[in-house]
Each structure stands twice: as C-alpha cells, then as structure tokens.
Amino acid sequence: MNDFITIGQVVRAVGIRGEIKVRPITDNPERFKKLKIAYIKSRPYKMESCRVDGDFVYLKLAGVSDRNEAENLKDLFIEIDRVNAVPLEEGSYFIADIIGCKLFTDDGDEKGKITDVSQYGAADVFTVTDGRKTLRFPFLKKMIVKVDVESGVVLVKKNVFDEVCVYED
C-alpha cells in the first residue's frame, strides 16, 4: 500500500503572500484544518493557516512566501502520511488503495486493472485498462459484490456493470 494519501490538488495561487487555492479530494474539507504537515511531490510543508470557503480550501504553507512560489505548485497534488489519515467508515476506501486493483465481474471475467478514479458528485468514475482497451463506469453501490484492497480485487455484478460501462475507442 501507498504510504501517502492524496487529499487535494492545487488550483492556483491566491494573493501575493503565497496562499494557494486547493480542490479537496476528501469527503470532508474541514479535515484540512487539523493538518500540521502536508506533502507536495514528497516534500513536507508545515501548515501555517487554513480556511475553507465553499468547495475549496485555502492554505498558507511554510516556505511558500510569495505568489511566484505558490504558482509553481499549480496542478500538483497534496498528500498526507497514511498514519495521519482519518479512519474510514466501513465500506469506504482510499482511492490510492483502489488504484491498481484488478476488476472482475461476478461471472469470473477479468476486465483489467483500475488505473484511475475520478470523483464526481453523483458517483466516482473508475477507469480500467487491460493493455488493449480502456473502459469507464460509475461505481454504484448496487453494483458492488466485494472490494478487497488487501488482495487487490474488486468484484462487481456483471448485469449492472454491462448496463453502465462505456468502452473507449
């Protein structure tokens, strides 16, 4: 398992003192307020301040003192140590643990490896590749048979999967 959990992505610099606007990749953006250290490209940054406004989080990181330094962080991901992650509710998983799992339908057909998870309001969208083709599908509760991140396997109901899966050309 990955030692880091991605919790957000830098959208842009804000102001002239090095503050950054972050799109949270977490169920509860208020969690940012409890952070002491975050990582960007494996470099640790101490949190100087944090505020949540609407759908975004605004951070001031130690060592990022002006707009130019903040602009250099644009589009990069913010991570935390796994040990500092908030415990998950049963039936919830970290995206980092889902990526790399093999996807099977309940008739035993292996569809490929999960390579990406995009978060949208209604449902997360999984991207799966088998080396030749790519497919995407919304990860719906009615589809799930089993998620076993320890074994690296996600099992879904074939009939529901076939209804919602989209193959790329």
Image (cartoon, grey):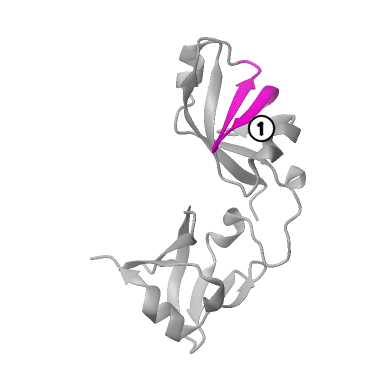
Is residue 48 covered in magenta?
yes
57 or 112, nearer to the observer:
57
Across and down, in percent, residue 51 comes to: 64, 27
Q: Residue at x 71, y 30 (%)?
A: 37
Q: Quadrant of the N terminus?
A: bottom right
Main SS of the magenta part reads strand
Of residues 42 and 97, the one nearer the viewer is 97
- Residue found at x 57% / y 55%: 95
> In the rendered image of this protein, does residue 49 appear above or below residue 77?
above
Q: Position of residue 7 (x, y in %)?
A: 60, 42
Residue 77 falls within the magenta-colored stretch: no
Task: Measuring from the top left, give residue 41's x and y in whole percent.
Answer: 55, 33
- Residue at 41%, 67% in the rendered image: 137
Q: Is residue 133 above or below residue 12?
A: below
Residue 112 location, quadrant? bottom left
Residue 10, relative to residue 92: is it above or below?
A: above
Compare residues 123 and 154 and report the one nearer the observer. 123
Residue 143 visible to the viewer? yes
Mark 1 Cα shell of 10 Å, populated few (<14), some (14-19), many (≥20): many
Side of 37 where 133 appears, left or right = left
User: Where does the C terminus fall, quadrant-wise?
Assistant: bottom left
Element carrying mark 1:
strand
Q: Is residue 65 left or right of residue 123?
A: right
Number of numbered labels in the structure image: 1
- Outermost residue to the left: 169
Type of residue at label 1? Ala
Lateral position of residue 80 relative to residue 65, left or right: right
* Residue pointed to by mark 1: 38
Decide: is 9 above or below 60. below
- Which range is magenta? 46-63
Write the residue at 45% across / 84% down: 158
Tell me, yes or no, if residue 43 can be seen here.
no
